[in-house]
């Protein structure tokens, strides 16, 4: 179970780091993939903020796991699960599809919570 817990945590951390980097490098396609496309006349700073936030979350998770351990990462994952839960509501509230809201964001929250549970069990 230890290998599964650490592997899932690293994969999730790297994935959110990738998402952040993608928002910084390709903001408009990333916003469309998020479930709420950016308006052409919209302020690109908000997309950069999301990219930086996600990239920071990914790095922080990797740092916690490497230097503090599984228990700290478990608490971190538990708290970070709030983000995709609210992303679900944001997508639904702003005209995104239920498939994206539940299939991407809510499912991500569930996987992050599973990761937290596995890490607590280590």
Image: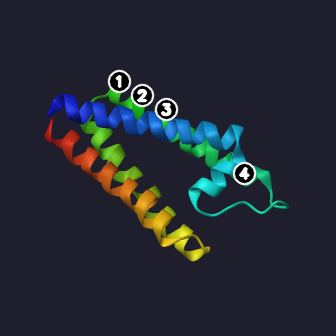
Side of 83 where 5 appears, left or right: left
The x and y percentages for residue 35 are 58, 62
Label 4: element kind: helix
Q: Is residue 102 above or below residue 117?
A: below
Q: Residue at x 23, y 36 (%)?
A: 5
Q: Gap in Å between the C-alphas at discs 4 and 3?
A: 23 Å
* In front of the other: 37 or 57: 37
Q: Is residue 97 above or below residue 16?
A: below
**Which quadrant is the N terminus positioned in?**
top left
Q: Residues within 10 Å of mark 3 (few under 14, many from 20)?
A: some
Label 3: element kind: helix
- Tags 4 and 3 in contact by the CB under 8 Å rule? no
Label 2: element kind: helix
Side of 44 where 66 appears, left or right: left
**Which quadrant is the C terminus positioned in?**
top left
Image quadrant in which you'd find residue 67: top left
Q: Residue at x 58, y 70 (%)?
A: 96
Side of 87 where 12 appears, left or right: left
Which colour scheme appears in the figure? rainbow
Please give the residue where the numbered disc 1 appears in the rendered image. Answer: 66
Please give the residue where the numbered disc 3 appears in the rendered image. Answer: 59
Q: Gap in Å between the C-alphas at discs 2 and 4?
A: 29 Å
Side of 30 where 122 appears, left or right: left
Q: Is residue 17 above or below residue 39?
A: above
Please give the residue where the numbered disc 2 appears in the rendered image. Answer: 63
Q: Gap in Å between the C-alphas at discs 1 and 2?
A: 5 Å
**Counting residues from the N terminus, which is met first, the one under dot 4 or under dot 3?**
4
Q: Residues within 10 Å of mark 1 (few under 14, many from 20)?
A: few
Please give the residue where the numbered disc 4 appears in the rendered image. Answer: 28
- Tags 2 and 3 in contact by the CB under 8 Å rule? yes
- Tags 1 and 2 in contact by the CB under 8 Å rule? yes
**Counting residues from the N terminus, which is met first, the one under dot 1 or under dot 3?**
3
């Amino acid at each position: 179970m230890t290998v599964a817990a650490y592997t899932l945590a690293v994969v999730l951390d790297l994935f959110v780091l990738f998402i952040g980097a993608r928002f910084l490098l390709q903001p408009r396609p990333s916003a469309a993939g998020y479930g709420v496309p950016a308006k052409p006349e919209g302020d690109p700073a908000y997309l950069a903020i999301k990219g930086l936030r996600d990239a920071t979350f990914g790095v922080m998770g990797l740092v916690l796991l490497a230097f503090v351990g599984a228990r700290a990462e478990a608490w971190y994952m538990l708290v970070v699960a709030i983000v995709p839960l609210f992303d679900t509501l944001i997508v639904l509230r702003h005209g995104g599809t239920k498939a994206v809201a539940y299939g991407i964001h809510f499912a991500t929250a569930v996987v992050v919570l599973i990761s937290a549970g596995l890490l607590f069990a280590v």
